[in-house]
Image (spheres, coloured by chain):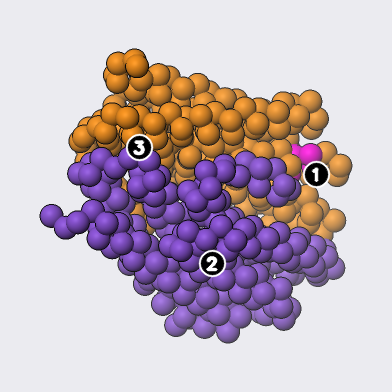
Chain colours: A orange, B purple
Amino acid sequence: MRHFQEELNELQRRLLEMAGLVESAIHFSVRSLTARDQEQAQRVLRSEATINQMEIEIDGLATRLLALHQPMAGDLRFLTAAIKINSDLERMGDLAVNIVERAMDLMGRPPMKPLVDIPKMAGLAESMVRKSLNAFVNRDPELARSVLLSDDAVDDLKDTVYQDLIHFMESDPSTVAAGVDLIFVAHNLERIADQATNIAEEVLFLVQGIDVRHHAETAEE
Amino acid sequence: MRHFQEELNELQRRLLEMAGLVESAIHFSVRSLTARDQEQAQRVLRSEATINQMEIEIDGLATRLLALHQPMAGDLRFLTAAIKINSDLERMGDLAVNIVERAMDLMGRPPMKPLVDIPKMAGLAESMVRKSLNAFVNRDPELARSVLLSDDAVDDLKDTVYQDLIHFMESDPSTVAAGVDLIFVAHNLERIADQATNIAEEVLFLVQGIDVRHHAETAEE
């Protein structure tokens, strides 16, 4: 049996690896949308199976470490945080798949309007995933807090996207179906940002023992 | 210190209590929509604070039991399931709040069309919450499986709602903003049903050690 600390490092390494896959999935889901590229869409769909498999393995590893080592205090909190972060990452993978499904639907319709704010939202969401995981492995509360700020920026962009699309659909009803697809793309990106925010809040709880979860939620809307 | 088994029972009792609150929140969120009733909307918003507080307390209790009793095998699996179910329930409470926000927006617009399928979806979602929690406390795999079947029915209803609303918006663009609100109501109900399905899958894993999580997801779309 390996040393406990070594196993915790392994768990952390695998969470980072999974986060890398999720970040790519977000990136290519929106690339498949803007480039109307079937190949990049397929790429995201293929990566989902890998992400799902990793979730099951990481969950098994964390639960096994809980059972075998019966850790106390800090290590226990680390393991329960890892279990939640793992589940948050897997949900983000699902959300990237939702975006790809909308992108594939949109490929069958005439282009509606140039997409500016949606790629911006995606860029922010990707960097939030990376930062929240780096905050976790480095136990960095400042970095975690910066994720909470980016979440506000994503929410503002989403509001702009919604308003623009609703005006567009009202003025040209032939774009309604495409507009609904794009509204859902923006909605999925917002949810990805929310999941990254959940991770950042877990990190703050882990590092400082401050439970910011529901304060942030109240501030959201 | 109370006996461990007594503490596990207490944890279970509080999860059931939280599930009851979540079920009511779903019910009154859709009632506020169909009745255009501000008072019922406020009722859901007030219950959210209680649900959030319960989540923090249940999470604390489960984590404390993990730390103090360092349980093995079945009890460990029960506690990690309880932590996930707690988080699923809290997310459902958030989704009911999302529905209320759309309902309040819709109260400021002329009524669009009589709502038939959305209340049906809500009825199914409520019963899925109740059944998934009963399956958990009674360790009942049959009941858990019935939740998975209801999820398919909810998905079918959601598809019907989307198609109806898109046709409606295309034929009368003055209904676009209201239609988008209603599409999001249906989307939130679908997500509530998905969370109940997650709980049912956790129960199957707990009772039978079968991980159905990603099989069900594949079948979904």
Looking at the rendered structure, the kind of residue marked 3 is Ala
User: Residue B103: in sight, yes or no?
Assistant: no
Q: Secondary structure at mark 1?
A: helix
Q: Secondary structure at mark 3?
A: helix
Q: In the drawing, does residue A211 fall left or right of residue A217?
A: left
Rendered position, B128 above or below A7: below
Quarter the N terminus of chain A occupies: top left
- Residue at image mark 1: A105
Which residue is drawn at the image coordinates 42% and 58% (left, top)? B90
Nearer to us: label 2 or label 1: 2
Q: Numbered disc 3: what chain?
A: A
- Residue at image mark 3: A81
Q: How crowded is the residue under tag 2: few (<14 C-alpha within 10 Å), some, or many (20+)?
A: many
Spatial CA distance of label 1 from label 3 is 37 Å
Q: Numbered disc 1: what chain?
A: A
Q: A90 and B150: which one is in front?
A: B150
Q: Secondary structure at mark 2?
A: helix
Magenta residues span A102-106
Which residue is drawn at the image coordinates 37% and 69% (left, top)? B17
Q: Position of residue B3 (x, y in %)?
A: 19, 56
- Residue at image mark 2: B131
Looking at the rendered structure, the kind of residue marked 2 is Lys
Spatial CA distance of label 2 from label 3 is 28 Å
Are the residues flagged by discs 2 and 1 in contact, CB closer than 8 Å?
no
Q: Main secondary structure of the magenta part?
A: helix
Nearer to us: label 2 or label 3: 2
